[in-house]
Amino acid sequence: MSLVEEIQKRKTFGIVSHPDAGKTTLTEKLLLFGGAIQVAGAVKSNKIKKAATSDFMEIERQRGISVATSVMAFPYRDHQVNILDTPGHKDFAEDTFRTLTAVDSVIVVIDVAKGVEEQTKKLVEVCRMRRTPIIVFINKLDREGRDAVDLLDEIEKKLAIHVTPLSWPIGMGQGFKGVYNIYEHKLVLFRPHSKQEEEDIIEIKDVHDLALDQHVGKRPADELRAELETVTAVYPPFDREKYLNGDVCPVFFGSAINNFGVKELLDCFIDIAPEPLPRETDERKVLPTENTFSGFVFKIHANIDPRHRDRIAFLRVCSGRFERNTNYYHVRQERMMKFSNPTSFMASRKEVIDDAWPGDIVGLYDSGNFNIGDSMTEGEKLHFKGIPRFSPEMFRRVINKDPMKTKQLNKGLDQLMDEGVAQMFVKELNNDKIIGTVGALQFDVIQYRLEHEYGAKCDYEPLSIHKACWIDADQGATLQAFIKRKTKDIAWDKDRKPVYLAESAWGLKMAQETFPDIRFHFTSEF
Ligand code: G4P
């Protein structure tokens, strides 16, 4: 098969949601449809969210499971579908943001009763910034929930996106009859926990057809007709170009646990979702159809076995063909490397592969050569964009509890930071190490892993820092002068970029006003 044909076959996407909306259940049902798993209950990766905050033993256990389910690939209708899993726990939000750099589209799951929740808002914001095409799946229609029109209104307002429903629910909760598939003009009847048989899908091209009444009853049929009239008046017809541009999001209704509405979603997804898209680098745009291979690392996962400090780097292939046992150029380290056992993740099986194509995710065994964001090419110096670090929300100073193990502590901290567990800043004034995270959970994870994997012990001193801002200026001298003036608030990130640690919102505002020539950035990519 040619490169172009391989590209056209692939659909690489992520499913995102606020915890408990049904992401895991939907993922599992998609895998069932794809024949990738045979039984329900096989996907447990993001149950981390259910662990108590301090239960990091459980987190460690889950981390091991989630390696296997980080990427799930399966064939469906002549396509290869690559699902990238994202952690549900909010403390791992940054991990999710990074994973989103490796997808070409997303499915957002929303709970019909809860509507738009906090985590959904943040994740969709990131997708919107990158114009990632979004399909919305409204879940749990078997339960009483919000009115469909109100919910779509809320989605448009809170997520600042435009929607076009491609299916419409008939009733809800106890009275849930099914959905009318606007995209394919079909009535799909709901039977709880059914495998959704062929006879449940009835072709009704025109909703005024009386066959509709026979199947769902006259009142629900009339309600559906009235609602669809409003829907077609209010929402524009589906336009694929607009969806691909990130301007409009198609919406489906269903019940993942009952396997309902999932097949429609998957079939439509296969029809409309983008194939592997070009990627921006600092140097130029990289097209998937280019013959030379390129890719970037978006995630690093430590192996669960603490005795082997092996890690798996997840690389997204962006162009050309990746081949086993072939020398590729590690751009940051400026050297050639080859891989004898690159793995793919077909369902939860790991398999050594001989080649991979744009859109594919390859697992590379790594003994510390990779950082998140690293590029591999056939020799060209490319730096893929879009893997920024965001200002952390919580900061603590690391205290070494066992000075005899300083070397181990430093090595452990460096490696955990490479994995993207948290960010570390080294103070200009005294070389103090400051860890910044999105949530409290990471501090426990770091402490636990330092002890169990590196034999080092640390404690933390809480710091009141409001934000870490990356700083730059047009003139090097201006920046140097600022660093000198603010020495005690300056630290260096792992790429030796200067960062201003603002103690408070007010302090930051003052600094911005007093030093107008200094630019303050809230992400590392500017
Ligand atoms: P998440 O990954 O987004 O966090 O959500 P997950 O799939 O774990 O689903 C959260 C809860 O919602 C689960 O119940 C799941 O069974 C339930 N659920 C998912 N889809 C539907 C649906 O269509 N209808 C209804 N009524 N419930 C649904 P749980 O009790 O928290 O977990 P479990 O014991 O069932 O695993």
Image (spheres, rainbow, N blue to C red):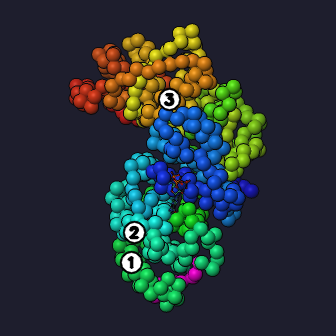
Q: Are marks 1 and 2 in contact (CB under 8 Å)?
A: yes
**Residue under circle 2?**
148
Q: Residue at position x 43%, y 81% from top?
A: 220
The three-letter code of the residue at mark 1 reads Glu
From mark 3 to mark 1, how far is it between C-alphas?
Answer: 51 Å
Q: Position of residue 234 (x, y in %)?
A: 35, 73
Instruction: Classify residue 414 as left or right of residue 364.
Output: left
Look at the image and tell me whether residue 298 can be seen. Answer: yes
Front position in the image: 40 or 182: 40
> Where residue 450 is drawn, which disc sits there?
none
256 vs 221, left or right, is: right
Q: Nearer the viewer, residue 39 or 416?
A: 39
Going by the numbered disc 2, the residue's amino acid type is Ala
Distance of label 3 from label 2 (alpha carbons): 41 Å
Query: Which label's residue is closer to the chain start, 3 or 1?
Result: 1
User: Which quadrant, please, contains the C terminus?
Assistant: top left
Upstream in the sequence, badge 1 or badge 2?
2
Q: Is residue 297 above or below residue 495?
A: below
Q: Which residue is mark 1?
A: 227
